[in-house]
Amino acid sequence: MSSVKTLNANAEVMNRAAALFMNINAAKGLMDVMRSNYGPKGTIKMLVSGAGDIKLTKDGNVLLREMQIQNPTAVMIARAAVAQDDITGDGTSSIVLLIGELMKQAERYLSEGTHPRVLVEGFEVARKAALEFLDTFKQPLPTPPAAPASEPSSSSSEPASAPPVDREVLRCLARTSLRTKLAEGLAEQLTDIVTDAVLTVRRPGEPIDLFMVEIMHMRHKLDSDTRLVRGLVLDHGSRHPDMPKRLDKCHILSCNISLEYEKSEVNAGFFYSSAEQREKLVAAERAYTDERVRKVIELKKQVCGEDQGFVVINQKGIDPISLDMLAKEGIIALRRAKKRNMERIQLACGGFSINSVEELCPECLGYADEVYEHVLGEDKYTFVEGVRHPHSCTILIKGPSDHVIAQIKDAVRDGLRAVKNGIDDGAVIPGGGAFEVAAAHHLRTVTRKTVSGRAKLGLDAFAEALTGLAKALAENSGHDPQEALLALQEEHERGNVVGFDVGTGEPMDPSTAGVYDNYIVKRQILQSAPVLAGQLLLVDEVMRAGINMRKQ
Amino acid sequence: MATGMPYGLQAMLKDGHKHFSGLQEAVMKNIEACKGLAQITRTSLGPNGMNKMVINHLEKLFVTSDASTIVSELEVQHPAAKLLVMAAKAQEAEIGDGTNLVLTLGGELLSNAESLLRDGLHTAEVVEGYQRACEKALEVLESLVLPNTKDVDVRDKAEIARRLKGSISSKISGYEDLLAGLVAEACIEVCPKNPNNFNVDNVRVVKIQGATLPDSRVVTGMVLKRDTEGSVKGVTDAKVAAYTQGVDTSATDTKGTVLIKSAEELENYSKSEEAKLEEYIRGIADSGARVVLSGSSVGEMALHFCEKYGLMVVKMPSKFELARLCRATGATARATFGAPTAEELGFAKSLRVQEIGGTNCLVLQQDAALGSIATIVLRGSTEGFLDDVERAVNDAINTYKALCRDSRMLAGGGAAEIELARQIADFAKKQTGLEQYAINKYAEAFEMVPRTLAENSGLNATDALSALYSAHAAGQTNAGLDVDGGAPRDLSTSDGILDLFSTKWWAVRLATEAACTVLKVDQIIMAKQAG
């Protein structure tokens, strides 16, 4: 009996064997769940929430977030995977798979009496070696001769027309990531959208801010109608029936000015003794707001020539009377715009946001070729399109039902991250399991010679676990995992870098097939998976006071 | 306790989670549920389809054969069946008609998939085959479009009525000629210069209990189920002033206090108040307006002065109704109270209170040139029946909208489906891979439509189907099922039944997509039901 029992009679204790058993089983159990949706040919899982909402997903991250996991070990692994997603945006399934594989391999050695500490030491050696190998394995992004990728600022003159990175490689990165989350045809279409979106918001010398890519969704038409809007889509419309629904060649005023009557903050009141006086008070109350609206209208008259439109996008409110005044001048006015949209407007259309009517000047105006309203059932959307130098854009996701939209949305987010990571890293890793097989080969042939003693066991387990990922890939595509792995290993022994072709089941060259993974994703996996697996292996007692750990 | 940690996913999830995986547990069960759903709606397909009596959670009774109403009131719980319902809803949102086709086709595709899976095909192969077949189906569908239907005069009442008939007859059988005529008349009335901009909102439907359906009529203008405020109950050739706010004394936003020091002042204050209001209302009357539309309350005193100047006062609590009435009269609603300018005034040819079936209704009638809103007044004996007719009319209006955008038509009565089945089956024979079985089954699923039509009409489905096949094999690609006679006949002729191409196009796409999604799911993880 454990000594904890004497301290607290109700405490629950698991001894070393039971603790290890639980940890290994939980890791393997979680792996079994995630295994079938790994890779482009993985299957879809249907999640039904407590309220009966449906979510369909292939994305490991979504799956882990939506599944309410309770087992403590599984929760730890899930957290590591969610951290993986926070940092890199991809590779959640891989990390769960690698941890599961590591635990599975460890189990074999443990049953033969190896001490967990020995294995963990081996893991540590292997991890370091694998990370070093990763650095030699990565392929720098091919750069066009004009501008080196490492210094994107050098090409600041024409950021839009001469991207200093190879678009094709980025497309491959996006495609590889998207295909693991969506059906092939759709992934292909989104590839261009995602790549172009990132290239649009990329500004020389500045880190890429993915928040400048707005993701909007409309429940309308088909998923294949998803498109990239080089401009903005705002999820609200004008609040006045007489405002124009469409304007061309628009000057855009973005402001943060209240165009509605606001009560004073101190407790104020009027005293009057006749209806005339009251009328005057009513007029006076409006005068201040009306004056501001009039200034906006003056500016419109000043800048707008024939057939030019004027659009006011206000972060604060515009009351019906002010709207009425603006509508009479043929101005589209949007009220209560979101703050992040205000930032995006400046990036997309130019101009700058003003905070008081005194700052009104023609220079602060942005420009867009067309602004129009789209009504979808009850919801209104305003499109701002045809801007001159877009540094912000919108991915407009369409789909016939909410679950389709949610699925695309999650995938787009990951796709954007993949492209961004690619640009940030300036390097890519050949995909399709090429790295895993190569790293395992490297560990077995090169690293093993440098290690002596019992650490070799951990190293072997690690190498075996890595190949597990390639096996899962083959298994999900309906091919024989052992055969596929052997074919890959043989090619690698010949010195070729090959990945697994999910279509044919044969080894293929990732660079010709255009299958690339992110460097940072692989790095992060190698960093955290062995550490977590090691921690789980070294647990020798699980204690819990209070409610029972197991379900009754 | 040490040894018995339960293994697997179940052990890791919260209590009450359900987890299904694999072919038997997940896929087959899903198919079963979808088949069940399709079974329910199937019998309502076509002009002779049966009505369903649905009582929803609010104990409201629905008697209808409109599939979208049935499924939305059924509150389907099963996740896979829900996917099919979502596809039907998407169809409803996109076209507004053809929901039953989505459900029936989707259910049939899945039940055919079941037999394929039992034969040992992998779901991926079935999905692949279905997707290939879907592409082919859309291609064939395109080629089946009846010639001379691409361009249509959307203002030709007889032609439009003919095209709307198919949509109505599937919901309200027996009155399709009457209703198609009414809908066509109303839609043409409000169709803008560019038919693409046709707004379904401009055709209103008002249900008034009493009399019989043939007493229904179209009003060029609006019919509102409300009375006027004052005693003026009817005007002709009148100008209209509209206000989004109430017709009353103006008030400040900030709280005001009347400062009164003596009894005289009190008296004077009320008088000045009255004088001010009278001034306003006189201003309205002087501007030539004879009707005042108020967006919210009408003050007692304001009403008094309106009476004095002979103004008709109408209260419109709904902002949207007010906007519509403004559109119908051409008035601009003023945000502030006061005399309107000449441009802000609207015009009503005739606006009067009429008693229809015991209800006082405000009827606005406009000349055709002015009217941008038309109203179909439906009469009928029971509320339930009227609701059903309204749904049919709404579907037809949506069909008109779709027609304005894409007027291509197909022969109805299962003609297009049989041709699709035939051509896709031929296509399957040319395939080499395992998908051919799936494509073949896909073709078979289309047979379900004429089969169901025949079954619902009390005909021998197998006989009808083989007769159709032989007619099509003889080159009569537009031969469809005559639900009255049973023998196949060419439905593209002037007295035939036509279906909208876009309805079928979307239905095929959405049904296939839903079926494939259901098939692709291999694991279901259900959280504990909330509550």
Image (tube, coloured by chain):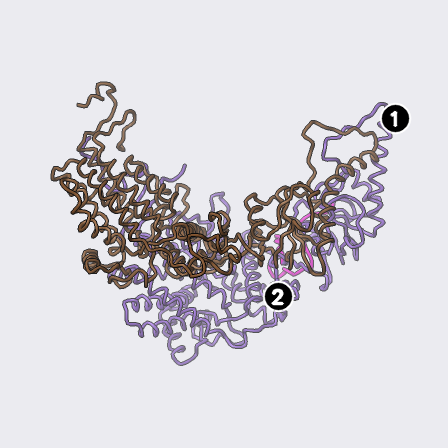
The answer to which image quadrant residue A286 occupies is top right
Chain letter of mark 1 equals: B
Q: At which x and y percent is residue B473? A: 38, 79
Q: Secondary structure at mark 1?
A: helix
Q: Secondary structure at mark 2?
A: helix
Q: In the rendered image, which residue does mark 1 sit on?
A: B264
In the image, residue B425 lies in the stretch drawn in magenta: no
The outermost residue toward the bottom is B474
In this orientation, which residue lies closer to the viewer: A367 or B527? Answer: A367
Q: In the rendered image, which residue does mark 2 sit on?
A: B195
Q: Which tag, 2 or 1, sits closer to the chain's start?
A: 2
What amino acid does circle 2 point to? Pro
Residue drawn at x 19%, y 33% as measured from the top left: A18
Question: Tag 1: Cα neighbours inside 10 Å, few (<14), some, or many (≥20)?
Answer: few
Q: At which x and y percent is residue B445? A: 36, 65
The outermost residue toward the top is A7
Chain identifier of the purple chain: B
Chain identifier of the brown chain: A
In the image, residue B214 lies in the stretch drawn in magenta: yes
In this rendering, the answer to whether A294 lies above or below B410 is above
The answer to which image quadrant residue B401 occupies is bottom right
What amino acid does circle 1 point to? Glu
Magenta segment range?
B203-228
